[in-house]
Image (cartoon, grey):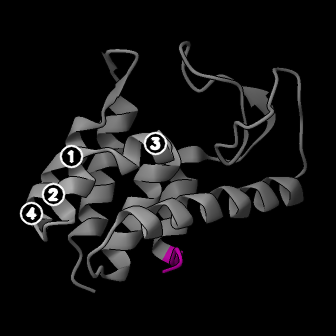
């Protein structure tokens, strides 16, 4: 499957375009563009075009990760929500999660309940992650 428009919009709304490297939170890593972190150092800059290219690359690995980890049929909304989560937490964490284990036994409700558990950064609850997970669940549970 591929990320749909609603999923891309959700990710971009939380990652927000930044043309100069920044730390999203004090405990985070340097980030640039739409949540791009690989090879980024403080002081780096990019153009909107480079940010979009990185976004597409980063989405591609998140799609690949989700397609590899999830063994059950998904709606577009479910897939988009899972790509957003994987984009944010990384493939290793996503693939080994209870959310994926529940999903792979067709426990969709149990999987949806797991999104909220991913609200921590280095042991601290972040309000932004609470909001993002709620938006992801809403998309995951959307009927159309």
* Sequence-first disc among 4 and 1: 1
Question: Contact, CB < 8 Å: mark 1 with mark 2?
Answer: yes
Relative to residue 109, is residue 5 depicted above or below? Answer: below
Circle 2 packing at 10 Å, graded few (<14), some (14-19), many (20+), is some
- The image quarter containing residue 81 is bottom left
Q: Which mark is residue 102?
A: 2
Q: Which of the 4 quarters of the picture holds residue 21?
A: top right
Task: Tell which tag, 4 or 3, sits nearer the viewer.
Answer: 3
State the predominant SS element of the stretch in magenta.
loop
**Marks 1 and 2, Cα distance to the nearest angstrom?**
6 Å
Q: Which residue is mark 3?
A: 92
Q: CA separation, marks 1 and 3?
A: 12 Å
**First reached walking from the N terminus: tag 1 or tag 3:** 3
Residue designated by label 1: 98
Q: Which stretch is magenta? A: 1-5
Answer with left or right where residue 75 lies relative to residue 58: left
User: 65 left or right of 128?
Assistant: right
* Residue 109: numbered disc: 4
Determine the secondary structure under disc 4. Answer: helix
Residue 58's x, y, as percent? 66, 55
């Amino acid at each position: 499957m591929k990320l749909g428009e609603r999923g891309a919009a959700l990710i971009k709304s939380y990652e927000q375009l930044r043309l100069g490297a920044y730390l999203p939170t004090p405990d985070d890593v340097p980030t640039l563009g739409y949540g791009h972190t690989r090879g980024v150092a403080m002081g780096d800059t990019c153009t909107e075009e480079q940010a979009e290219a990185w976004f597409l690359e980063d989405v591609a690995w998140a799609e690949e990760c989700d397609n590899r980890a999830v063994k059950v049929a998904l709606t577009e909304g479910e897939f988009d929500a899972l790509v957003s989560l994987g984009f944010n937490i990384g493939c290793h964490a996503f693939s080994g999660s209870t959310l994926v284990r529940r999903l792979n036994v067709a426990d969709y409700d149990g999987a949806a309940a797991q999104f909220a558990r991913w609200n921590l950064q280095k042991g601290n609850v972040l309000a932004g992650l609470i909001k993002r997970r709620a938006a992801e669940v809403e998309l995951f549970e959307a009927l159309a």
